[in-house]
Image (spheres, rainbow, N blue to C red):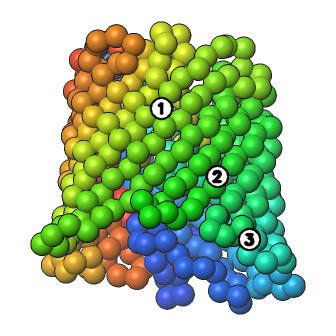
Amino acid sequence: MSSFRRAALLALLVGAASSPAYAQSSALPPVAAPSPAGGFLFESRLRYEGVRQDGFDDATAATLRARLGWESPKRSGFRFLMEGEAVVALVADYNDTIHGPSTYPVVADPEAFELNRLQVTWTGLPDTEVVLGRQRIVLGNARFVGNVGFRQNEQTFDAIKVTTRAFEPLTVTWAWVDRVHRVFGDDSPVGEWRSDSHLINVETASPAGKVTAYGYLLDFDNAPAQSSATWGARLEGSRPLSSGWSALYAVEYARQSEYGANPARFDLDYVLVSAGLKRGPVTGTLALEHLDGNGSQAFQTPLATLHAFQGWADVFLTTPRDGLRDVSATVSYAVAHPPIGRSGVLTAAWRELHEVEGSARYGSELDLSARLVLDDHWAVEFKGAHFDGALAAFPDRDKVWVAFDYRF
């Protein structure tokens, strides 16, 4: 990034931080529906990420991300939004995937200065919203389609998206995607995928819980190996038990095959089974997630927010060709009145990771996090991951993050 762009971004952040109008953190609950009057949008995140990985020098990344935008008032059913995004590396001892250096492990937060969103929303039909342009798309729990919000440069889509509740009790979403703007940025050779993809998602409530059916038909002109057709369904819900306890459960199945320009031939399964208990501020879950592999191809989710799955150390952003079986246990504690701030969440997770095609063990991982909401404006997060690899292909690594979030 040029010195001019760096200076401009720093000036923007200083000015924004001095204004009481800028509020809320990206670690806070999601922002409510936009005001009919429109207005400015601003959010920023300052983050330290340290990585120690066998075979590499220790990496240190200190990055600053800012997004500044404006949303118009709603008129005649139309609303316009534009938003820019910039990422500056304050300490750059890491492999950013563009400039290297390759002696460091990857921290996929390259410097960037680009358009993040540019969209028009129309709500002229009853119970229906149409969004056209560069936009954020997150479907369900982001297991298949998400914005990769953990990384500094957000993943967005050039798309048309239609969401309707006109067929109650169904909520139907369809999107056609022309471009995928990935977290690697405009300067990366893999930063943009040319797409002719369709996303279909149908949700409804049932006595057993929330039911979702989906079909994701992904066709990428410049990434044909990532093209696939995935059809699946998910059920998730909860049931009250005695003495204040609740049972939590989720089951999901999907089938994936080749699609579009992909020259390979495969039919692969995805299975999730999760069960948990909740009482007051404590939640515990056990989960089994199975991503099939046949020795040459594996079940992939290239548009997902992958950091949230298979461990925060990001060892398995690409499913190994022999598949992946992830058995995990997670415990979280919601702190209602911490000594500092307004609320907080403590989380610990342990997982064992094995291949599906054979009997090999990939390794195990421990993840820990503490997130503290300070007020309506700020939040801070401390987070760590330790992966203990059992195979040379998946070496040991430790990662630590400290992040400060601020949002208008």
- Frontmost residue, 304 versus 154: 304
On the image, the x and y values in percent for residue 248 come to: 30, 57
- For numbered disc 1, what is the local secondary structure? strand
**Mark 3 residue crowding within 10 angstroms, few (<14) / some (14–19) / many (20+):** few
Residue 345, how many percent across, how many down? 26, 65
Identify the residue at horizontal 75%, vertical 39% (top origin).
197
Residue extending farthest right? 76
Are the residues flagged by discs 2 and 1 in contact, CB closer than 8 Å? no
Q: What's the residue type where badge 2 is placed?
A: Asn
Q: Indicate the position of residue 100 as horizontal and vertical percent values.
A: 51, 29
Pointer 1 local density, CA inside 10 Å: few below 14, some 14–19, many at least 20: many
State the image quarter where residue 404 is shown: bottom left
Residue 265, located in which quarter of the rendered image?
top right
Residue 400 visible in the snapshot: no
Of the image marks 3 and 2, the number of the one nearer the N terminus: 3
**Circle 1 sits on which residue?**
270
Give the Cα separation between the discs numbered 3 and 2. 15 Å
Q: Earlier in the sequence, mark 2 or mark 1?
A: 2
The residue positioned 43% from the left and 72% from the top of the image is 29
Marks 3, 2: nearer the viewer: 3
Q: How far from the left and from the top, in percent, is residue 302? A: 58, 35
For mark 2, what is the residue?
201
